[in-house]
Amino acid sequence: VKARLAPYRTAQGESAQEVLIDWKNVGNATITVVHADIVAYDRAGNVLGSSASDYTVFASSVAGGVKPGRIYHEPRGDGFVLIPSLDGHASRVSVRITRAG
């Protein structure tokens, strides 16, 4: 699992960040849904309020999903948006897959 932070502009024009998650299907079945814990940190290492637990980071209604051995690269605009707040922007993010199927 690789998580990237990318600049994002909200519909209200606010500066935010988007978490883009790349992952590999290491199993032997096609994956159509993935859930993960997303934890954003500030420069001091404090957890930001816009983190999420067991969040759906990938869902495919198209037949096929992500086949075994393939890597999914999340495109910009499809990621998890960190809500701009008094916490400020994240300096890093960690992602842990909680469920896949």
Image (spheres, grey):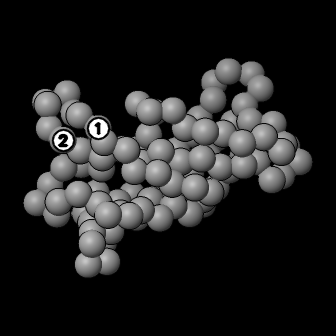
Is residue 34 shown left or right of residue 3?
right
Outermost residue toward the right in this view: 28
Q: Bin the neighbour count of mark 2 within 10 Å (Cα to Cα): few under 14, some 14-19, many 20 and up.
A: few
Q: Position of residue 85 (x, y in %)?
A: 14, 55
1 and 2 marks in contact (CB < 8 Å): yes
Q: Position of residue 12 (x, y in %)?
A: 13, 30
Identify which residue, 50 or 2, lies in the foreground: 2
Identify which residue, 88 or 97, lies in the foreground: 88
Is residue 72 shown left or right of residue 14?
right
| Residue found at x 74% / y 36% | 66
- Position above or below: 90 against 56: below
Circle on res. 15: 2
Q: Bin the neighbour count of mark 1 within 10 Å (Cα to Cα): few under 14, some 14-19, many 20 and up.
A: some
Is residue 78 shown left or right of residue 50?
right
Pointer 1 or 2: first along the chain: 1
Is residue 79 shown left or right of residue 59?
left
Name the amino acid, label 1.
Answer: Tyr
Q: Secondary structure at mark 1?
A: strand
Q: Position of residue 44 (x, y in %)?
A: 26, 78
- Position above or below: 100 against 51: above
| Residue found at x 29% / y 38% | 8
Name the amino acid, label 2.
Answer: Ser
Does any portion of residue 46 appear in the rendered image? no
Q: Position of residue 70 (x, y in %)?
A: 78, 40
So how many labels did they put on this image? Answer: 2
Residue 1 is drawn in which quadrant? bottom right
Does any portion of residue 90 appear in the rendered image? yes
In the picture of the structure, the residue carrying the numbered disc 1 is: 8
| Residue found at x 58% / y 55% | 2
